[in-house]
Image (cartoon, rainbow, N blue to C red):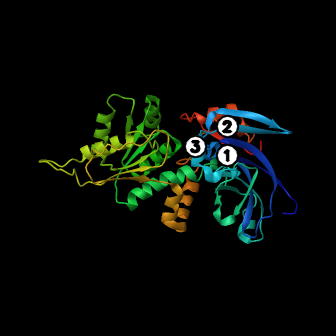
Amino acid sequence: MNQSRMNIELQSTLRKTGEVELRLVEQELAEPARDEIVVKLLATPFHPADMSLMFARADVATAKTVVCGDRSITKLQCSEGAAQAQSARRDLPMAVGMEGAGEVVAAGSDHAAQALIGRVVAIMGGGMYARYRIVRAADALVMPDGVVPSEAAAAHINPLTALGMIETMRIEGFSGLVHTAASSTVGQILCRLCDESKIPLVNIVRRSEQVDLLRSIGAEHVCDTSDPGFEDGLLRALQQTGATLAFDATGGGDLASRILALMERANAPQGGYHHYGSAVRKKVMIYGTLDPSPLMLLKNYGLAWEIGGYLVYHFMDRIGTEGVDRLKDKIAAGIKTTFAVNYSRTISLADACDPATLNEAGRRATGEKFLIDPSL
């Protein structure tokens, strides 16, 4: 790079008072190392996980704008318990944004880095709510010709999460899946992937319109928790599919326990009394916290059961670089189809700090997904 560039990035800081400060910070962009590229970010999604880091568990309804000199800061208030639980991040500015896409505008001296100048790439790794981001050329997912940044913005987290669910199923010897909050972006991608690979999938949603949405993209088994016949319908779906591995995005309440109990009923041994239940392995992996209430396990499903967490980064470590690269190639090839995402609204970095916008985004309604364009 022959000329310096000024970068702007969104930072979140939790103060010891429990206040969370959101601000846009100007910084001079460093020169890329020989194997690095400079990406001008043009599209980055507003994921729930991004909001979690950004808000630091503060109540979005408390968001307000405070003018400090010639700068505006957005402040939110954490509860005392939430602030205490995150004491390790106090007074540490956190760069927000897990992934994004844009155009390579400069590069280090390596041939591989130079070859990417002018290409659209998708990148991940944090700090993506910014004008520019410097990453290793080897870490960028290069998009096919004709793909624009808005199509590639969410090329990592959700696609790898969905692909990871299928890979985990295969690695651990299961043959079908159950997925909660299934009308989400991850859920829709998983639905398409399972349809393509003929993998039995049971989708769980909480409203009738979400049933209609999944039916419209080809889902066969969709169970609505608001339906009085939910458990009967889920039992039938489990009997028909043989699915005994669930991925739960709610992370609270008794839904995981109910799923395990119905898996047990669907696989109950015939004849006689079995004190410890069936020997069929049943597992729930929690990967979200949509339900903030405590997780309840009622233990009415024998002893052949497991429950644990699922994080895409841990999955990536599990399969190694070659495995991740194989999945990334699949994502790039299907970015306009299997892994396509629709956004309801495009906002600027300044909008992402606006209290009204934060409250809209915080609702997390199905179909309401925001895209940030840092160039605006």
Q: Which mark is residue 16?
A: 1
Q: Is residue 365 left or right of residue 144?
A: left
Mark 1 vs 2, N-terminal side: 1
Quadrant containing the N terminus in the rendered view: bottom right
- Mark 2 or mark 3, which is nearer the start of the sequence? 2
Q: Which SS class for mark 3?
A: helix
Marks 1/3 in contact by CB < 8 Å: the verdict is: no
Whether residue 372 is visible: no
The residue tagged with tag 2: helix, strand or loop?
A: strand
Q: Residue furthest left?
A: 272
Q: Is residue 161 above or below residue 210?
A: below
Q: Which mark is first along the chain, 3 or 1?
A: 1
Front residue of 340/53: it is 53
The single residue placed furthest to the right in the displayed view is 3
Residue under circle 3?
82
| Left or right: where 132 falls relative to 277 | right
Q: Residue at x 65, y 66 (%)?
A: 138
Q: Gap between marks 1 and 3, in whole Å?
A: 11 Å
**Residue to which mark 2 is pinned:** 76
Disc 1 versus disc 3: nearer the observer: 1
- Place of residue 132 in the rendered image (x, y in percent of width and height, measured from the top left): 76, 53
Asked if labels 2 and 1 touch by Cβ distance under 8 angstroms, the answer is no
Disc 1 residue type?
Lys
Give the percent coordinates (x, y) of residue 33.
76, 68
The residue under label 3 is which amino acid type?
Ala
> Which amino acid is tagged 2?
Leu
Q: What is the CA distance from the residue labelled 1 to the residue labelled 2? A: 13 Å
Residue drawn at (77%, 35%) of the image: 66
